[in-house]
Image: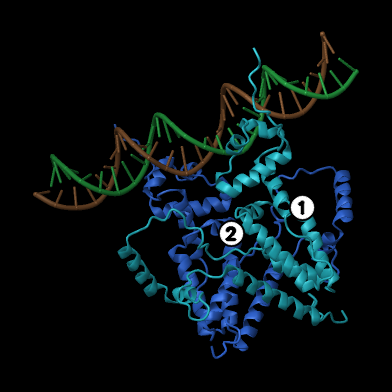
Chain colours: A blue, B cyan, C green, D brown
Amino acid sequence: MAQVLVAPRVRLNRDRVLQAAVGLADQVGIEALSMRRLAEELGVVPMALYKHVANKDELLDGMVEVIVAEIDPPARDAEWKTAVRLRVLSARQMLLRHPWARSVLESRTTPTPAVLDYLESTIGIFLAGGFTVDLTHHVMHAMGSRMWGFTQELFDASADPAQPPADPAAQVAQIQAMTERYPQILQISNAAAHDDSVVAHGCDDKFEFEFALDLLLDGFEQLQAAGWSSSPATPTA
Amino acid sequence: MAQVLVAPRVRLNRDRVLQAAVGLADQVGIEALSMRRLAEELGVVPMALYKHVANKDELLDGMVEVIVAEIDPPARDAEWKTAVRLRVLSARQMLLRHPWARSVLESRTTPTPAVLDYLESTIGIFLAGGFTVDLTHHVMHAMGSRMWGFTQELFDASADPAQPPADPAAQVAQIQAMTERYPQILQISNAAAHDDSVVAHGCDDKFEFEFALDLLLDGFEQLQAAGWSSSPATPTA
DNA sequence: GGGTAAAGGTGTACAGCGTACACTCGGATG
DNA sequence: CATCCGAGTGTACGCTGTACACCTTTACCC
């Protein structure tokens, strides 16, 4: 009796696990990524994963390593301002590819090597651009999560799923109530449309991101030109 | 036989539940706050809570309402810049009292009334300060989560619990490895100490926060003075 | 080639979670 | 007194991460 030919049974390894995890998170979202679901995706029993990652936390760390490696390296021979700008916008592209990445990045407390590499080289851009160590320190703080290409918005209008159609009458009533109680919020949120294209509901995320980014970069530039230091005057003392 | 006197059995209500939840989160952290744990704290069976909040998500929304209400109202008769500054720093104080609040605020997708009130009145500060609707829109985006008194840091050095003492030799080795591979990160993080007080490891969070906040506020001021508009030239077209 | 040790994959089990559903009981109202 | 309603209870389900013991496949050495 010839043995039944089973599928070749490719062996698992850490990298296959991480790649699958990233792919699965891309597809079904991070909250649906469980060890069981991931194992199923890989055609394997849940506990098999634990031969390759210590626990779920380490899995998430590994996923961060994978996606941070996707960020472009710093542009060579560019002025610091454009170099930082390009880098951050590259990070932002990565985040758009992996919508779950933001919350995972936020949740990690201890930095992994890829993250440290990213920081090291970004710091290098500022230092090479003539920033003092002191100013670079504060500048890195001020960048905060913008370094990753995101800022926490006040509320995430994009995420509002499973909202049932709701009858138009109720919707109108709700909008009316809003205009009465929160007139300025409505005014502000409607300002999204540049010029007079009344159509555009929802803002141009890219514009908003770059608006704030450039505001900060311009601020950094001014401080640097003025020879800013955190001990303001540094008198003879 | 006289009936045994049981404790008076104060009745539960939504407010008692929310207050207890906030208090419990303050004590044991948000990840340890489960419906079961909260019920136990209130001397009640888990399902009893569901008579007062629809589900855990609504519990979290309620907790947000409680803490957002703790933020000071806008200062009257103050210039916009100081008014915003005071408000945001007040929010920051609230966040320091409730360390879990940051992650919960981030996780909420649909804004609750208290949150909307907060936004409405903050927008009011800018508009009253002479900002156009257009500029206010972008400015609110640029503030992002800083409006709540926090920014996502690149990595959260403060949270690193349960780190066992680790023998000094290993520690030295690790630091040595760091200096070789990430010299600039170390340089930057050691710049925390103002002047030459070599002691201070860890930065002055308040200083860093205000540094970035003021950088933004100054930027806003310049744009406003220059009559900035999002459609740069607005030619005759 | 045969023996052996390690590495990879499996199965079972447990404690914890949020919460659906059916119930009991106490207090207010007719 | 009867009734009714809402607060609190008890049980149960499906989900989660993962400890532990087991089996199977692979890699290597004599």
In this view, the residue in front, B165 or B105, is B165
In this view, the residue in front, A191 or B210, is B210
In this view, the residue in front, A139 or A122, is A139
- Chain where mark 2 sits: A
Please determine whether, in this image, residue B58 is positioned above or below residue A197: above
Q: Is mark 2 on a helix, strand or loop?
A: helix
Q: Residues within 10 Å of mark 1 (few under 14, many from 20)?
A: some
**In the picture, residue A211 is in which quadrant?**
bottom right
Query: Which x, y percent locates residue B182?
Result: 42, 73
User: Left or right: A62 with respect to B37?
Assistant: left
- Residue at 87 percent of width and 54 percent of height: A181
User: Left or right: C16 with respect to C2?
Assistant: right
The numbered mark at residue A102 is: 2
Query: Which x, y percent locates residue B40?
Result: 59, 34
In this view, the residue in front, A57 or C5, is A57
User: Left or right: A53 with respect to C27?
Assistant: left
> In this figure, which residue is indicated by the disc labeled 1?
B114
Identify the amino acid type marked 2.
Arg
The total number of labels drawn is 2
Query: Which x, y percent locates residue A217?
Result: 63, 78
Q: What element carries label 1?
A: helix
Q: Nearer the viewer, mark 1 or mark 2?
A: 1
